[in-house]
Amino acid sequence: MVDVAIEADATLTSLALRRAQVLHGLKFHDNMFRRLTMGAALTVLLILGGVIASLIMGSIPAIRAFGFDFLVTQTWNPVTEKFGAMAPIYGTLVTAAIAMAIAVPIGLGVAIFLTELCPYVLRRPIGIAIELLAGIPSIIYGIWGLFVFAPFLQAHVQPGLIEAFANVPVLSALFAGPPYGIGMLTAGFILAIMVLPFVASISRDVFDTVPPVLKEAAYGVGSTTWEVVRFIVIPYTRTGVIGGVMLGLGRALGETMAVTFVIGNAHRISVSLLAPGTTISASIANEFTEAVGDLYTSALIELGLILFVMTFIILAIARYMLMRLERQAGA
Amino acid sequence: MTFTYLRTAVVAAAMSLAAGGASAVDISGAGATFPYPIYAKWADTYKKETGNGLNYQSIGSGGGIKQIKAKTVTFGASDMPLKPEELQEAGLVQFPTVTGGAVPVVNLEGIKPGELVLDGPTLAKIFLGEIKTWDDPAIKKLNPKAKLPSQAIVVVHRADGSGTTFLWTDYLSKVSPDWKSKVGANSAVEWPAGIGAKGNEGVANNVTQTGGAIGYVEYAYAKQNKMSYVDMINKDGKSVAPDSESFKAAAANADWAHSPGFYQILTDQPGAKSWPIAGATFILMHKAPQDPAAASEALKFFSWAYEKGDKAAAELDYVPLPDAVVALIKKTWAAEIKGADGKPLQN
């Protein structure tokens, strides 16, 4: 009897021991997993910090030499080593604005058509076409822009624009000058084509997440398709759509090769959208390899820093807008 | 057993490495993109003849200068010569390898290559944006016979920093005080007019596409692509076409012997046949190289190139240096590039 009890006790202890071992092993694995993922997350922070630090260190000579004037000066003179970033900043913002003005409405239109209206057989081909568009390397867009698109604009679109707006007060200045083919408008168009797939495919994916019951209910009470999109789909997916738009904007701000090919690369601010301009990334790509002298290199690195800060500010604004939207929706 | 086997393997590997090292030295260089095709061609032939390879990275002149100063390569290459003071400061020797230059190209209906002729001051005014149409009196005066349209002139320039731009702006600075004070000479400048394009092909393409355009490209590029070039009036007041003769004349007429560090920019050179916008491309090496063996191999390579590389250079439309200049360069090597023992690396 006693023997049995002892034996049972021993079995129990060994069982508990094994249990503890197994639990310990699981805990160890869990811990490892936690550390690994944390390590991955910290790597991102570390890389980001490293980028910021090296950008700031690299641009110190330029910041010392030009100070705040760097942001508001248009001169970019490698001979006298006087540099100002206003023309590239202006070009970056204007081309991105043109791109978004074209890509967002079209992208949303594509997404709405695909999710709400498109016959089932067409959905896949159009969806795949959009994703393929996103996969084309930017240099291809650049070459196509320079050899095909710019000559087409020069011959068929720009003369028409110049003539059509010749007597309209503000627009005549925006569309003035000889049709070069390349220029800020062309760059904006190319960027729009490049950004479009981001906006369209992300919007489509988030539109697909709308619960059918909501839409069916809306149709049930007699809504038109437009009303369903306007009052059900878009409010429900706002956050995701804005996310897609921001991703597109990020690409438009930083895109380099395609823009370099078609923007005309002039460090000047022109009112006319048909005139050549430059962007931050195009300037860096063009000039970095042959930049001789510390100040020149440093000015280019400071341009990079400015682009970094600009992207950061725009992302922050997007976050803030999303927060406000969510608060409104909650209230 | 296993140990012996391992040891044999290691020794064999070490021996084969050492043997490989002795038979094929790789010379490393970095810099200008303009001479890259000819350096690559020379390297290829040289490797077949001697077994020694050359690893040249065409990262741009600026990068080449930085790398040789940082001693990460055996030689650096630059389209823009360094000033003698700068060479002195960094302990570098500089010498030219081949000549090239810039050629103005136009897109004008009814004008064939070489039909139009321009002089320096007019070219400067066009690129300053002061002469705006092709039927301007200044252009008409130089071309009384050509049918010039009243078309707007579209100026196309390089957007990326480039040795070609340096030669172009250096020439315009020499012939136009206005250009010198307003713009100056550099591998990238603040252009007063026109559109910028990336690379020779970008400029060429923009010129071909835009009616009334004028741009400039490297001589080799203009020739290989049969672009509609413009003749120039040189310092002696003679009209010359861009061909290997006129580039050679420009190199021959320069006063190399009295230029320390071969600091010569072959723009606006005297001589009836001299093309006015020519320039040599340069090699930079340390006077007291860290690795004398590699430096010696590099000098052997360039020496071979001067002797046997002319034909290859001409095939690629680079203009070889006159023999007198090569003799001067070899004298400089003997006098200035020395090993650790103070003896010249190359005689």
Image: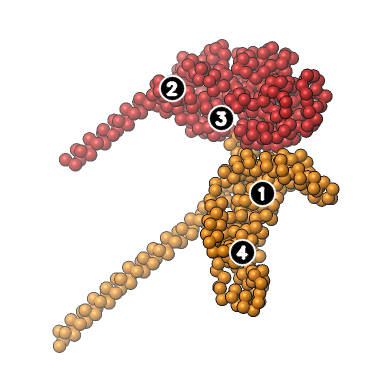
- SS type, badge 3: loop
Q: Residue at x 75, y 27 (%)?
A: B124
Q: Which mark is residue A112?
A: 4
- Quadrant housing residue A66: top right
Residue name at image x 30 percent, y 71 percent: A22
What residue type is disc 3 on? Ala
Amino acid marked by disc 1: Phe
Provide the residue designation for mark 1.
Answer: A189
Residue pointed to by mark 3: B32
Task: Please state which of the two labelled residues, at mark 4 or mark 3, is closer to the viewer.
Answer: 4
Instruction: Tell me the SS state at disc 1.
Output: helix
Q: How far apart, in angstroms, are the residues tagged by discs 4 and 2?
A: 64 Å
Q: Chain of mark 3?
A: B
| The one of A4 and A203 positioned closer to us in this rendering | A203
Q: Residue at x 72, y 28 (%)?
A: B108
| Of marks 4 and 2, the one in the foreground | 4
Is label 4 in a helix, a strand or a loop? helix
Q: Which chain shows up in red? A: B
Viewer-nearest of discs 2 and 1 = 1
Q: Secondary structure at mark 2?
A: helix
Do tags 4 and 3 sit on the same chain? no
* Disc 2 crowd, CA 10 A, few/some/many (<14, 14-19, 20+): some
- The residue that label 2 is drawn on is B46
Q: Nearer the viewer, mark 1 or mark 4?
A: 4
